[in-house]
Image (spheres, helix red, strand yellow):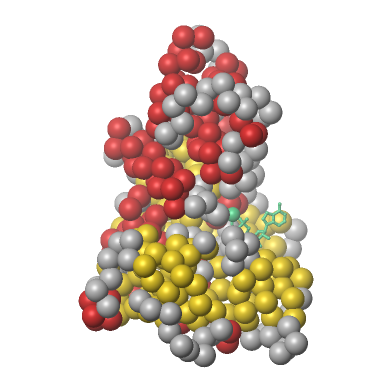
Amino acid sequence: MSVMVELNNITKKYGTITALNDVSLKIPRGEVFTLMGPNGSGKTTFLKILACIEKPTKGEVYLDGELVGDRNVPKLRLKSTMVFQKTVLFNTTVSNNIAYGLKLRGFSKRAINERVGNVLKLVKLEGYEKRAAKKLSGGEQQRVSLARALALRTELLLLDEPTANLDQRNTSIIEAAISQIRQETNTTIVLATHNIFQVKILSEKVALVNNGKIIHAGKTHKILNDSKKLADFARIENIFSGVSHITKDGTSIIDVEDNTKIEAAIRRSGKISVFIRPEDIILSKTQLESSARNVFEGKIVEILDLGPTVKLRIDAGKQFVVQITKRSFIEMQLSLSSKIFVAFKASSVQTID
Ligand code: ADP
Ligand code: MG
């Protein structure tokens, strides 16, 4: 099998910040490879280096067997397409947005129309050709942005947290489109995410990254079944950002949007990021009388069996990832779409910085 991406001892510094620290890795052609790690771990930097948008401070990158140097960057840039976390669409129709890159590459009108139709079908936006792209919802815009990248059919597709902040419906559509590309083409896909479910459904290999280093890399099923390896990453779930206000009681209320306010046993005001460990969240089928300050009603949208424990994703306006023992999972008779209450203490809410 030929190697699509090879990194040898890549270090990337921004001034005094080391975004990537001596990373080496090979990705075979046709593989879906995920990078999982918390904010600031270096995922975006990694993708930008593969896209030839950023130049490493040290080390070598090979794309499709060719060493990336100053001269061949313009050519090698055409090998990949990167979908950024924050979508910026042009202020024109959906179809013009998708056609733009194809026009630059000299495709005929007929070929362009065919590809536009094709990719819109993939992201379930058939009939949206003439709609104003900027007027679509955030999720739909993200789907157009994915469609625009897919239309180019580059050998390497770089996806930077394509479903971050999206609701369940948009997330599922994007995941299904990625699955379909994976099955029907030989595209190499590198996907950055902090969603463990996505890693499980979409990728054959995963690298766990932290502080610019690959901590573990290997076959997805092996890494996900190794709870010791995953334990290093307990922090990556349930990260919320918002604006915090100190209450009379000396705690803080953080408005994380989507009608969700989280109470934390800290005194902080202004912008803040917090996380709650999946094992610190309590589930119940009825609204418990408990001392937990944070109680939200939702439903189970995903179930991931990890052997002795089960991870659940719960949509309660915001999405929460909860980890419980297999035994409680069975005793509570939980299943997909079950209505459920999530509860956690103000003292379980921890700041990231
Ligand atoms: P991730 O995508 O995993 O959140 P990034 O690759 O965006 O991580 O960032 C890795 C580190 O590099 C962070 O500490 C971030 O602040 C820093 N960084 C990223 N881009 C720049 C930049 N253009 N200038 C300075 N620092 C940057
Ligand atoms: Mg990023």
Residue 91 appears in the rendering: yes
Residue 333 in the image: state x and y as whole percent. Answer: 24, 74
Front residue of 332/180: it is: 332
x, y percent for residue 287: 43, 80
Q: Residue at x 57, y 80 (%)?
A: 349
Q: Quadrant of the N terminus?
A: top left
Say which of 272 and 335 sits in front.
Answer: 335
In which of the image's four quarters is ligand 2 placed? bottom right
Task: Please say if 69 is above or below 12.
Answer: above
Residue at left offset 47%, top offset 15%: 113
> The C terminus lies in which quarter of the figure?
bottom right
Indicate the position of residue 152 as horizontal and vertical percent values: 49, 26
Location of residue 68 (image quadrant): top right
Residue 33 percent across, percent down from the top left: 40, 50
Q: Does residue 66 appear left or right of residue 179 in this picture?
A: right
Residue nearest the observer in this picture, 58 or 314: 314
Residue under the image location 27 percent in, 66 percent down: 335
Q: Residue at x 35, y 76 (%)?
A: 285
Residue 226 found in image quarter: bottom left
| Tally of numbered tags | 0
Return the residue nearer the eye: 265 or 111.
Answer: 265
Q: Is residue 215 visible?
A: no
Does residue 18 sit above or below 186 in this rendering? below
